[in-house]
Each structure stands twice: as C-alpha cells, then as structure tokens.
Amino acid sequence: MRLVQVLLAELDSSAIASGSADVAQVLQRFGGDQGDMARVLTNRVLHGFDPEIVQFMVALSLVRDFNAELARHMTGRPESHAWLEMLVSRNVLTFPLDSSRRWYRFHTLLREFLLAEAGERMTAEARRDRLVRAALWYRDRGEHATALDIALDAGASDLAKDLLDQLAHVVVGDHGEMASLIQWVDRLMRSGVQPSPQVHAWYIWALCDSLQYERARHALDDLDRRVAEEPGCASDELRERLLFLRMMVGVFTDRLDEVLAQAMAWLGRSVAADALTVAAITTFAAIGELHLGNLNTARLLMERAERRSIARTAPMAWRGSASSVPVWRSARHVRRPPTN
C-alpha cells in the first residue's frame, strides 16, 4: 500500500482533484508482485546516481555476496571500496554481513532489479567474464565450493570440471555432502561436459548413499562405456572401485545373482584391501547366498566377515565412511534373516 501511495504521490494533486489524472492507469501498471516492487523501489533508490556506479552495482549483482577486493577484481574499478562505503552510508539497500563490515549483500528486491538490468545492459560475454573472474578469485583463496557454483553459473564448464576434480573427494569422502556433488555433476552434464572418471565414480557413490540406486546404475553403465572407449582413462584402482560400486548397486536393484558371482570372484582373487571393503564384499556375497536360500553358507560368510573384517574395523568407520549407510543396511538385513 505504501508503494501505491508513492506512485500516486508522483501525480499532480490538482490533476487528481480535477479528474484529469488517470489513476486507474497508474494502478494497472502496478500489480503488486515482487517484480513491481523491485522496479519501484530501485528506480527511486537509484534515481540521480552516476551511471558508472549503477553499472558497477549491476556487475556485482551477479554474485550473492561481495567485498571491496572481490568487487575490484570483478569490475576493474579502483573506486570499489569507496563506492561500497558510499552505498552503505546512504542506505542504498546494501547491507554488511559481518561486524567488520567487510562483506556485503544487496537487498533481494534490489538485486532482482539489477539482475534484470544485467540482462539488458551486459552482453553474454561480459557477464561470463565477470563471473569467471569471481570464480577464479574464490579459487585462489581456497574457497572451491563457491568458485564451482559461480563457474557453473558462468557456463565455464572447463573451469568447473577442474574444480570438481579438486573438490569431489573432499565433499563426498570427507564431509558426506552427497547432495552438493550430485547437483554439481548434474549441472555440468547438462552443459554437455562429462566429469572426469574419478569424479564420475564419486557421483555414483553419492547417488548410492542418497538411495538413488537406479540413477546410480545408469551412471555406472555410462562410466563403463567411457572406460571401454578410452582404456587409458581408468586406473586399476578406479576399476576396483567401479566393481565395488556395481556390487553395491546390484544389491539394491535386486541383481543378486550377478552380485554373488562378482563378490565370490573378488574374494577368490585375494585382493589387498582395507578391512571395511573386505567386510562389505563378504556381506554382498552373503546376501547373494541368502537370496538362493543357502542360509548356512550365508551364515558362514557373515561369520567370516565378522571374524576377519568387521571386528577389525573401528566402530565409527561404519558411521563415517561414505559407504556406511548402504553397506550397514546390507549387513543388518543379512544378520537378521526371515524366520521362514
């Protein structure tokens, strides 16, 4: 209602009194949605500003948060610090995010308006250039996740692919942030670029841990085709990881005959592996035997897993490992078979 009042106040009061002002037309131009609010607020806020400052704000709107150093790196303007201080001091819908007043953010409505202006004022090449500069700035400071998000926004697929190579094992293996990796890889592949085989394997792992087993199976098939077409792209270690993942996916997509054959072949090779991996694959074999009704063999396999592997694995390893959720569900299922 206040914004409607502001619009009507711009009409000549005598014209309103005489009926010559078209109040209805003013109201028709203002529907009250968020876009209208952004336009009205921002036009009034930016009225009389130097066009160079407005262009500076338009460029900064491409990123959600910014500081003077990032602003200068993105825009090339040495006045960045002074301009930001001026925007804050004049209460131009620009807010500090920390007590040191180093980081800032535009009000949501102001940023929405500025992004719309960016679509009209900036070429696609200029927009991409500003975003790539921001991504490289964050990368050089070790903030790879933020850099990756911005690189994907910029459509800088090669940069995003390189960042994923550096980030995937940390995001999934160390922090268990499966949803983040899935989202990043999905966005990369939608741009027509395949992740590296190592990242592709982490992607499959994340899908499994997120209980998206059919998607994981399709992703495995895609990676198998890539490995077959480019034999040198996969190391022996990666091939072993892919076999483990195929067994795990097979358990949860009811391909238990295949899983049993793969698990027994793996166990027969006496592959050097950590206790957790041996326990998991032995459990996979037990699930396959249980599926065939061979309860005694399944029990012996689980005793073997318990004696040789599970007992040697630290209790927290089952909870902290990237494979802990699906593997532990498997083990629990086998150790409590149906009474019939």
Image (cartoon, rainbow, N blue to C red):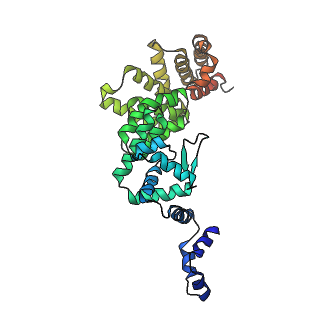
Question: What x and y, as percent, mark residue 7?
Answer: 57, 72
| Quadrant housing the N terminus | bottom right
Look at 59% across and 85% down and name the residue there: 14
Question: What x and y, as percent, mark residue 172?
Answer: 51, 30
Tell which residue pokes out farthest to the right in this image.
339
Look at 34% across and 33% down and name the residue there: 226
Look at 36% across and 44% down and name the residue there: 192
| Quadrant housing the C terminus | top right
- Residue in the foreground of this view, choosing between 231 and 112: 112
84 sits left or right of 73 in the view: right
Q: How many marks?
A: 0
- Residue in the foreground of this view, choosing between 338 and 181: 181
- Residue in the foreground of this view, choosing between 252 and 224: 224
Question: What x and y, as percent, mark residue 214?
Answer: 49, 38
Q: Quadrant of residue 103?
A: top right
- Residue in the foreground of this view, choosing between 324 and 32: 32
User: In this orientation, does residue 194 appear?
Assistant: no
Question: What x and y, as percent, mark residue 15?
Answer: 57, 85
Look at 41% across and 24% down and name the residue there: 238
User: In this orientation, does residue 7 appear?
Assistant: yes
Tell which residue pokes out farthest to the bottom in this image.
18
